[in-house]
Structures are given as C-alpha cells and as structure tokens.
Amino acid sequence: MATDAGTPRPRAVLVGVQLPGVSDAEHASDLAELARLVQTLGLEVVTTVTQRRDALAAAAVLGEGKLKELADLTGGKGIVPSGAPKVRTKARAKWAAAAAGPDAATGEESDGEDAETARPTVVIVDHEITPSQARNLERATGAEVLDRTGVIVDIFHRHARSREARLQVEIARLNYVAPRMREASGGKERQRGKGAGEAAIELDRRKIRDRIAELREQLALIQKEQDHRRRARQEQLRVALVGYTNAGKSSLMRALTGSDVLIEDKLFATLDTTVRVLRGDSRPRILVSDTVGFIKKLPHDLVASFRSTLDEALEASLLLYVVDASDPTHDAQLAVTRSVLCEIGAESVPSILLLNKADRLDPGARKALLRQYGTEAMLLSAHDPADVAALVRRIVDFFEARMVEEDLVIPYSRQALLGEIYENARVVAEAYDESGTRLKVRGLPGAIARLRKACEA
C-alpha cells in the first residue's frame, strides 16, 4: 500500500466495536492508536465508524445498520450476499459493460466520478477478525479490509532491516496470510500437485507451510549465533531499553551511547536489537541494548518471532522502562510493557522507570508525574545533555553498588590476563613484587570469581 511522493494516499475508514468492560476512554485510546498505525502504513484516515455490542457480529463485525452506514461511505451495498460470489468471466464482463450504456463503454466521466474517487477504499478493523468476517465485510463495502493484526504485520514487514528481523516478520506474515487465502473465483479449481485431486488452494497452502519451515530453520541458525554472542556477554554489565513503541527508546539509545541508530517519529521504527557501549570511561564497560517496542494487542506470532529481542530484556542486569510522559495514555502503555515482560519472566529484573519527553510538559504536569510515580522514576528528556548525564551516573551507581573488591596476583608468566582483567573489572590499585603484578579490582561477583580462577590456574 505504499505510495510515491506526490501520489494521493489511499483513504481509510476505521471500524471499532466497544465491547463490555471497555471504557469510553480506553476505546477512544485504542482507536487513536490504530489511526497512528494506519498513518504509519501510509494511509489517510477520513472517518471512524463505531458501535457498542456484546460481541463482534459473526458475519461482518458490525450490525446491519452500522454496516449500511459503513457501506454508504465506501460505495458498497451494505449487505452480505448469500451464497458464493458470482463467477466473473470475460463474456459476463462484456455483457455488463454493454448493459451499462455508452458512457461506461467509452470511458466518459460521469458526474459522480469525483465523489467516487474521494471514497475510502480501505476499511481497518480495530480487532482481530476471522477470514470469513473480512471476506463478508469486503463484499458488503466494496473496499479492501484489514484488521489490526494485518496492519501491524504489514508495518513490521516494511521496517525490518536485518536478516534476522526479516525472517521473523516473514514467518509472522505467512502465518497471517495462510488462513486468509481464498479459492479461485472462476469455476472449478485446477487440480495439480502431489495427491490425487489436490486443488490449487491446497497446493498454495502447502507451499506456505514448507516456506515457514524453511524460514524457521534459517532463523534457528541465526538465533543460535545470537545465543553464543549473548552467552559471551553474560558476565558483562548489560542494560536493556524497553517500552511502548515510539516512547523515545532509540533517541535515548543514541544519547547514552553516541551510536548512529535510526530515529523516526513512527510506530515500530526499530525492529532490530542494537547493542552499544555506554558513554564514558566506566570500567568494566556497560553495554546498552535497544529493543523492539511493545503495543496493545501485539500479535502472538510477532511476540514469538522476536524471541531474541525479548531475551535481551530477560538476560539484562538492569531494565530501563522508557515511557512517553507527554502521552495522555502513558500509564496504560506502561502497563502493557510490564505485562509483556511479565509473560517472559523478566518482571524480577531490576529496573528504573524513565519518564521521557519531559521537554514537552509544563511544570504542573511534571509535578503531577513525580507525585504519581515517586522517587523511583526519573523525569528526563533524551535531548537534554544534563538529563542524560544524570541517567548515566544513576546507571553507573546501580552497578557500583553491586560490585565487590578483590586482590589478584597475576604471575609474570600470565601477564596476558591483564587485558581480560581491565576489560571485565575496574583496577583500583596496581603494584609489583617478586610474585607478579598485584591488582586491587572492583567488579561483579561472578566476573571476579572467574578472574580469580584464571589467575590461580
């Protein structure tokens, strides 16, 4: 659905059903977030159709009245035709064109053409819907239909850059597409393939299953390499930035590390895990990793696919919960982040709450946030050097409080160990005698124990 510069963007209508237990504010927040997702996809949102219901209508999500209202916007008939769709053939199309009169045959513009071109051509549903519901909505509205999951999968597909992310997203996309494949509309399906009488739709679905299996094998090899690299960093000091999409994690990553990471005011601009060294000369060095953002109703296939990104959070020594404090729904976004991390068992990892984008807040809003979250939270802006410096100090202090001191003796025959010691600990004092180099070092207990064992070997 991407459009070239200067080309009018496709127009879309949002559809939301407010179910029991969902407040008006929560429903409005969900639709506002969906609108941002749709805009990230390159579509123009023109209006929203909502309805209160006990459940989604089994046939076409909305009730008859609201379905007709939606169809009036898109130019559809507003009813779900009974039976199979009409078979379209060249002969039938030629007959229909002749019956429509000379204007249709010659392609002359009708008075209503401008109105037709201005109509929305896409319907976006803020729920996960079944393939039959999507098909019925398309037949009733005459527009392309996507659900929330389809929008998110499409955004991920566009933004994936690394090979690992592309494989992860492709698996999720194929899992989404497979059950939504439709039978050919023209007569009997062609028969081909392995089994006797295997229809084309069956063959296509089997090809998708085979492709998913192939992608998973490739992804397993990449993730095995990632696991090796992660284990190599196991004893290093690691910080992971986690939070809702577009909370400012990448901006904070750049400020903390000086790395040239992608920064865009878009949802899911970052899908790849990036690991960089914290600014400053702290020893041992501290690694900072940026992770994929979370969102409400994130499809399970995508959560599963981005296992390696979530593992960064699970295995970190410290989590930085990044929240867009200027967003009115920041408390709900923080709840989503905590819920996802709880699902993977990372809720016990020590954390610091960062109320980001404080430069967009007035003094009253700042005071209210500090009253709400207390001293456990830091109010900051990723664009304020003083705020970033204060955060760096807090990170260093966190690790410093967990370090222990140890005296190590490195025999002159083992001086090659000095590089490893300086890499994994901070040398407080250094002296020499007949037994070798004597160092007083500070580091985390696990790293110190390993270094002591290496010196005594």
Image (spheres, helix red, strand yellow):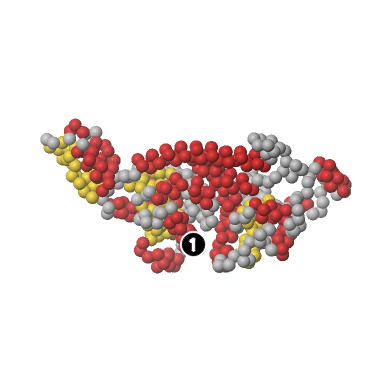
- Picture residue at 36% right of the left edge, 62% below the top: 376
Task: Name the residue tied to disc 1.
Answer: 332
Q: Position of residue 329 (x, y in %)?
A: 50, 62
Q: Residue at x 45, y 55 (%)?
A: 343
Element under label 1?
A: helix
- Outermost residue on the left side: it is 434
Give how far across and how far down residue 77 sits, in percent.
76, 57
The residue at 26%/37% (across/down) is 419
Quarter of the image where the C terminus is located: top left
Above/below status of 225 relative to 135: above
Quick check: 289 above or below 369? above
Q: Nearer the viewer, residue 34 or 278?
A: 34
Q: Is residue 11 visible?
A: no
Residue 329 in the figure: left or right of residue 258: right
6 or 338, which lies in front? 338
Residue at point 72%, 38% (across, down): 190
The quadrant in which residue 6 appears is top right
Q: Can you name the residue that lies furthest to the top here?
A: 413
Residue 332 spot, x, y in % from top left: 49, 62
Question: Can residue 434 be seen here?
Answer: yes
Report which quarter residue 259 is drawn in.
top left
Q: Residues within 10 Å of mark 1 (few under 14, many from 20)?
A: some
Question: From this viewpoint, which residue is outermost toward the front?
Answer: 196
Point out residue 143 in the picture as x, y percentages from the top left corner.
70, 52
Question: How many numbered dots are placed on residues in this image?
Answer: 1
Residue 375 versus residue 286 in the image, above or below: below
* Residue type beneath disc 1: Ala
